[in-house]
Structure formats: structure tokens, C-alpha cells
Amino acid sequence: MNTPVIAQKSPYAVNVEAGKTYAWCACGLSKNQPFCDGSHKGTGLAPKMFKADKAETVYFCGCKHSKTGATCDGSHKSL
């Protein structure tokens, strides 16, 4: 499996902490969306790391098709 599963067709709004690194689920299989829980093992996909520069609300991609990695770029609108 090299094509991710669509977890949801909208972003996840998450309040992140400055300096903290988050492992964004790229496969869509995690039960801890939008973050990795290890469900990707054997899929050929791996989580993408996101380091928060400041405390703010970040919109993490839910469809797993964003061209910008972990953050939403609106790709869900064309699925």
C-alpha cells in the first residue's frame, strides 16, 4: 500500500505547543488522528514530522493528500 487512506475530508485543527515535534499520520490508518500510532508499519508509508515554531492552531491534513506535507493545502476539496 503506497496510497494513503482518507481519514477525513477536512483538516484537523490542533492547538500545538511551541518547540514540540508532532508525528503526523501519513497513511490514514492511525486511530489517533491526525497523529501516528504506528499503524503504518508494512504500508510503505511513514509519518511526517512537524515541529511547532510557536504556540498556535495548526490545521493538519485529514485527507492525507496534501502537497505541503502535514498541513492542509485544500487538496481534500478535489477528492
Image: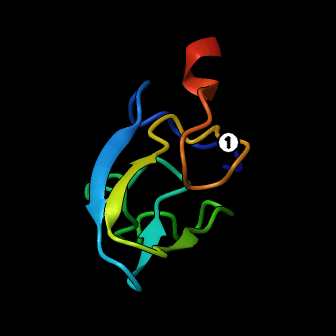
Mark 1: secondary structure? loop
Classify 53 as above or below 13.
Answer: below
Q: Is residue 40 left or right of residue 69?
A: left
How has the structure been colored for display? rainbow
Front-most of residues 71 and 8: 71
Front-most of residues 19 and 41: 19
Which residue: 49% across, 33% down? Answer: 6
Q: Residue 77 falls in which quadrant of the image?
A: top right
- The residue tagged 1 is 3
The percent position of residue 11, horizontal first and vertical second, equals 41, 36
Which residue: 46% across, 72% down? Answer: 23
Q: Quadrant of the C terminus?
A: top right
Which residue: 49% across, 43% down? Answer: 61
Residue lying farthest to the bottom in this orientation: 19
Residue lying farthest to the top in this orientation: 78
Q: Residue 26 falls in which quadrant of the image?
A: bottom right
Front-most of residues 55 and 59: 55
Classify 56 as above or below 61.
Answer: below
Dot 1 alpha-carbon crowd within 10 angstroms: few under 14, some 14 to 19, many 20 or more? few
Report how many numbered discs are placed on residues in the image.
Answer: 1
Q: Is residue 71 left or right of residue 56?
A: right
The percent position of residue 66, horizontal first and vertical second, equals 65, 40
Q: Is residue 78 left or right of residue 37?
A: right
Classify 32 as above or below 64.
Answer: below
Classify 79 as above or below 23.
Answer: above
Which residue: 56% across, 55% down? Answer: 70
What's under tag 1, amino acid-wise? Thr
The percent position of residue 54, horizontal first and vertical second, equals 41, 73
The percent position of residue 31, horizontal first and vertical second, equals 26, 54
